[in-house]
Amino acid sequence: MSILEKYVASEWCKWFVLISFFLFSILILQMLTGEMESFSSFLDLKKSLRLISSRLLQYIPWLVPISCFFATLLTVSFLKQRGEYLGMLSCSFSWFRCSRIIFVLGFVISLLCWVLVKSENDLRSYLNTNSFKSEGGSHFQMKIGKDRFWYFESFNESKLKGENVHLYAYDSLGNNDYRIRAKSAKWTTAKKWVFEEGQFIGFFSKKGLPIYNTQNYSIEWEKSDKRDLEAMGVLSPGFSKKFEKLDLEFGFDNPDIHILLSQSPKMLSFEKLKCLINEYPDPEAQELLSYRYRLAQINWNSVSCVLSIFCATMICTFNYKHSIGKIIILSLTGAVCFYILRTTCDSFGENGIAPPLLTAGIPYLGIVGLVVIFHLYRRSKWSLKP
């Protein structure tokens, strides 16, 4: 690494640290102001710092590219203002040779942000503030296609246990298969539901008549004759029995998926989004569109640091005589264009009008394309001057 590269790198790192400190300070102040009750409950400074760190995790991948962009703008602008930029060019040092270290730093920072996004769940667990699962007892519902419908009068998301449970199961024709009412039901580590103190009601269907087996606490199906099949669709049950315990076997309606689905896509981490998309029963379901789009946004955000540095470098080298004021105006114009593209693409991506990965990348690729076109236009216009 040459002396010039070390100097440019030190200038860029200085501005990057200052801008990051400024942005995160504003964010922390906003947290303290808007959520004072959350922090006032922690008299322990260590717990308060852990809570703040946990809240900052979700903002780091979005604020770091902004820091990279403005750090590059200020570095080049002050190099021009002090005449050091022209000095480098007059000594036959190309700007690319001097600024490539900035791109290397941007790539390293992008890589670190990606690792941070991938390990967000582990970091939250370490900070002991992973509270996407509530301890409350509000009602909870799960709809499994057209086959089953669950209703819990109260559900503890941390323990995965519900009280006053109602389960309605239907066959392919929409007729009743069976119903379960129970005092409680819990999702166990063996990936099955365990009901306690309830009643099982079975109806005739094409699969037969479901009955409760008292030996192994499970559901079995008895074959139906023609007379039984004629009873399909009626409300009167063919079997009814109270039970102390009932097991529904492995892989039956995982509540974690539906808990994730009840959260806003912006509140879920990368790993939780992947878990929801991969394990949801219907991969093409409309309910997953906004979550797929959010995952695509996170993937594109992993390269946003490098792209922001590229755009800032191109803006600063449009014209040697550009003042800081003109650079700020160009930057604000680009930010407005990016916001318009981002808002438009959000509506398309969340409604599944276009592929999520393509739609999420349009704002980034669009701004880069506009910057390159404007740069080439200014360069050609500058070269035509006498």
Image (spheres, helix red, strand yellow):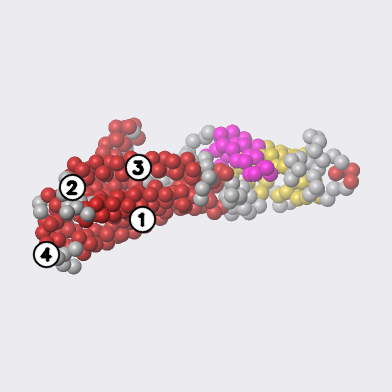
Q: Which residue is mark 2?
A: 322
Question: Dot 1, crowdedness within 10 Å: few (<14), some or many (≥20)?
Answer: some
Q: Left or right of 16: which side holds 304? A: right
- Indicate the amino acid at tag 2: His
Secondary structure of the residue carrying numbered label 3: helix
Q: Which residue is mark 1?
A: 303
**Disc 4 to disc 3: CB gap under 8 Å:** no
**Disc 1 to disc 2: CB gap under 8 Å:** no
Q: CA distance from mark 1 to mark 2?
A: 28 Å
Q: Earlier in the sequence, mark 2 or mark 3?
A: 2
Q: CA distance from mark 2 to mark 4?
A: 21 Å
Q: CA distance from mark 2 to mark 3?
A: 21 Å
Q: Which label lies toward us, 1 or 2?
A: 2
Q: Which residues are magenta?
A: 139-166
Secondary structure of the residue carrying numbered label 2: loop
Q: Which residue is mark 4?
A: 91
Q: Which residue is mark 3?
A: 337
